[in-house]
Image (cartoon, rainbow, N blue to C red):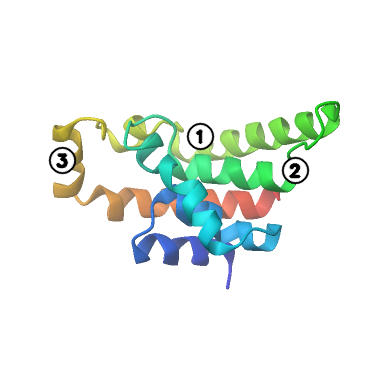
Amino acid sequence: MKKSDCAAALFEEGFSCSQAVFTAFSGDLGLDRDTSLKLSQPFGGGMAHLGEACGAVTGAFMAIGLKHGRTRAEDLEARDRTYALMRRFTEKFKGLHCSIQCRCLLGLDLGTEEGMKLAREKNLFKTLCAGYVRHAAEILDEIL
């Protein structure tokens, strides 16, 4: 199964955007499913429904870090490679969607009761977020 299909299936199953993207990749990078789901859960909805960075993006950033992040403070090469991949991911995602900010992508603020209510009424999680999850996983698959 392609990683984008796996991420889409996880999202459809009811996991957040960050969980879906991160968990689709984390198993191949040595992290078990339960730990992956727990670790990535707080980042959904733009960081705990605050409307900040899109959870699909933060899930991808976490996967990039898991694969390429440094484990020694002096390993500046790993740090720089990680940041470069995160920038490359961001450029590609913005090229498709113009932003990595949840509130911009959805056109409302999930951090408010009204925003969350509107998102649910308009079915934005299925109509918009599912696409963001798939695109994030496709880009991540390409750059990893």
Residue 80 locus on image (x, y percent): 77, 29
Question: Disc 3, disc 1: CB below 8 Å?
Answer: no
Looking at the image, tell me whether mark 1 or mark 2 is earlier in sequence order: 2
Closer to viewer: mark 3 or mark 2: 2
Q: Residue at x 64, y 35 (%)?
A: 86
Q: Would residue 67 be found to the left or right of residue 75 on screen?
A: left
In the rendered view, tell whether residue 39 sits above or below residue 81. below
The count of marks equals: 3
Residue 50 locus on image (x, y percent): 33, 31
Hey, which quadrant is residue 48 in on the image?
top left
In the rendered view, tell whether residue 101 sits above or below residue 134. above
In which quadrant of the rendered image does the N terminus lie?
Answer: bottom right
Report how far apart the C-alphas of labels 1 and 2 lie in the structure: 22 Å
Q: Which residue is mark 1?
A: 94
Looking at the image, tell me whether mark 3 or mark 2 is earlier in sequence order: 2
Closer to viewer: mark 1 or mark 2: 2
Hey, which quadrant is residue 130 in on the image?
bottom left
Crowd tier of the residue under label 1, counting other residues whose Cα lies within 10 Å: few below 14, some 14–19, many 20 or above: few
Secondary structure under tag 1 reads helix
Secondary structure under tag 3 reads helix
Q: Which residue is mark 2?
A: 68
